[in-house]
Amino acid sequence: LVDSLHIQKVKEAPVFSDVSPNSWDSVYVQSAYDAGVIHGVDSQHFNPNGTIKREDMATMISNALKVNYVPSSVTSALTFQDENQVSSYAGQSVAASVYLGILSGYPDHSFAPKASATRAEAAIVISHLLAVNPTQVKLLNAVPAAKINLTPSSLDVTTIDSQQIGAEVIGANGAVMP
């Protein structure tokens, strides 16, 4: 992932006590950590020989693409029979990864968020990641930067900062308005 996304490699000592500075993966783990792509299983450990859950792979993808905002129209489009098993920290990442076509579910309409990813799945994910549509990613890089007040007779938009705006208008019935 570090090489595929051209993440700058660092040569500093690993932040995780279970990653040896002399191991072949030390530079990659530290570089991905410094870039905000990965986090440890806790503040001291990475578990480099452990498996990776599909929901954690989605989180790494979102971190790598710097996903800041996932519209509710994207998250509500998920229809996996096991979507309630996705951890709260990974929900938007799973939605973003599926929306971008990087990850997908299984023929039985499940996502299997807690299942370990196979090596074949990891290879496919990297291939899909490299082929992702930049326009779609740009939508997910937007930062909600406005406060919108909607009443039956008015629409009030207050800009919070000068960054790209990503916003949704929710009608009185709770539905996202076009």
Image: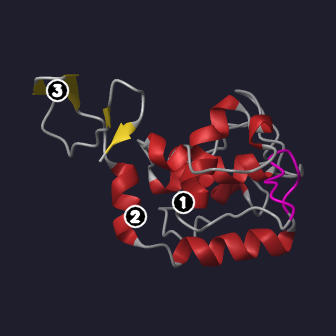
Q: In front here: 59 or 37? A: 59
Measure the alpha-carbon separation of dots 2 and 3.
23 Å
Callout 3 amino acid = Ile
Against 150, residue 12 (above or below) is below
Q: Are marks 2 and 3 in contact (CB under 8 Å)?
A: no
Q: Callout 1, which amino acid? A: Tyr
Q: Which mark is residue 160?
A: 3
Closer to the chain start, of discs 1 and 2, is 1
Q: How far is disc 3 from disc 1 in space, using C-alphas?
A: 27 Å
Q: Name the magenta segment's main secondary structure.
A: loop
- Numbered badge on residue 136: 2
Q: Residues within 10 Å of mark 2 (few under 14, many from 20)?
A: few
Residue at the image position 71 percent from the left and 76 percent from the top:
124
Question: Which residue is at a point 52% across and 64% down the rendered structure image?
Answer: 100
Residue 110, magenta (yes or no): yes
Amino acid of disc 2: Gln
Residue 73 seen in the current view: yes
- Residue 12 screen position, x and y as percent: 57, 47
Residue labelled with disc 1? 99
Confirm or deny contact between disc 1 and disc 2 (CB under 8 A).
yes
Residue numbers of the magenta segment: 108-117
In this image, 17 relative to 163: left or right?
right
| 91 or 117: nearer the viewer | 91
Instruction: In the rendered structure, find residue 154 and report the number of the disc placed on it.
Output: none
- Residue 132 placed where, x, y %? 49, 73
For disc 1, the neighbor class at 10 Å (few under 14, some 14 to 19, many from 20) is some
Mark 3: secondary structure: loop
